[in-house]
Amino acid sequence: VQLVESGGGLVQPGGSLTLICAASGFPFSRYDMSWYRQAPGKEREFVATVSKTGYSTGYADSVKGRFTISRDDVGDTVILQMNDLKPEDTAVYFCNTRFVPKPWGQGTQVTVSS
């Protein structure tokens, strides 16, 4: 089982980033998938989720209207499109299955700063 997140970086407030999670080693299409984040000194928190069919999504209130989650079952990837980024979005972002987590990947650092 492997989850590899990429796409993070340094961006100014109001900017955009697209995060990609590449999954392998498990039947990806059978799982709801989610993005999480962990800011310095804080616990990991839920960001967004997409159902196994891709038809249903859910978001934390803090990102609703700014972030969009999607999935590609051909490539076994989960995408998080992040717009109108704010300094409080600064964190390491991780993806995982929604209910019973697989081993966590390294995450990808997102830093929002002017």
Image (cartoon, grey):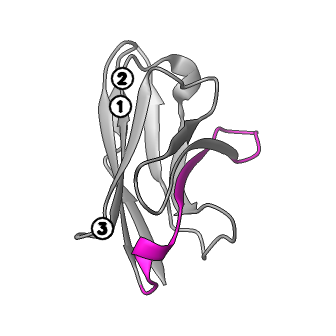
Q: Amino acid at mark 3?
A: Asp
Q: CA distance from mark 1 to mark 2?
A: 13 Å
Q: Residue at x 67, y 39 (%)?
A: 40
Q: Earlier in the sequence, mark 3 or mark 1?
A: 1
Farthest left residue? Answer: 74
Q: CA distance from mark 3 to mark 1?
A: 29 Å
Q: Which residue is mark 2?
A: 83
Residue 42, image x and y in percent?
Answer: 76, 39
Q: Are marks 3 and 1 in contact (CB under 8 Å)?
A: no
Q: Is residue 114 left or right of residue 88?
A: left
Please tell me whether mark 1 sits on a helix, a strand or a loop: strand
Label drawn at residue 73: 3
> Bounds of the magenta span?
25-44
Please identify, in this view, whether the residue under mark 2 or under mark 3 is nearer the observer: 3
Please tell me whether mark 3 sits on a helix, a strand or a loop: loop
Q: Amino acid at mark 1?
A: Leu
Q: Residue at x 50, y 64 (%)?
A: 106
Please identify, in this view, whether the residue under mark 3 or under mark 1 is nearer the observer: 3
Magenta region includes residue 103 = no
Q: Is residue 10 left or right of residue 95?
A: left
Q: Residue at x 64, y 38 (%)?
A: 39
Q: Residue at x 46, y 84 (%)?
A: 26
Q: Earlier in the sequence, mark 1 or mark 2?
A: 1
Q: Earlier in the sequence, mark 2 or mark 3?
A: 3
**Label 3 Cα neighbours within 10 Å, binned few <14 / some 14-19 / many ≥20:** some
Q: Are marks 2 and 3 in contact (CB under 8 Å)?
A: no
Q: Quadrant of the C terminus?
A: top left
Q: Which residue is mark 1?
A: 10
How many numbered discs sit on the rendered protein?
Answer: 3
Please tell me whether mark 2 sits on a helix, a strand or a loop: loop
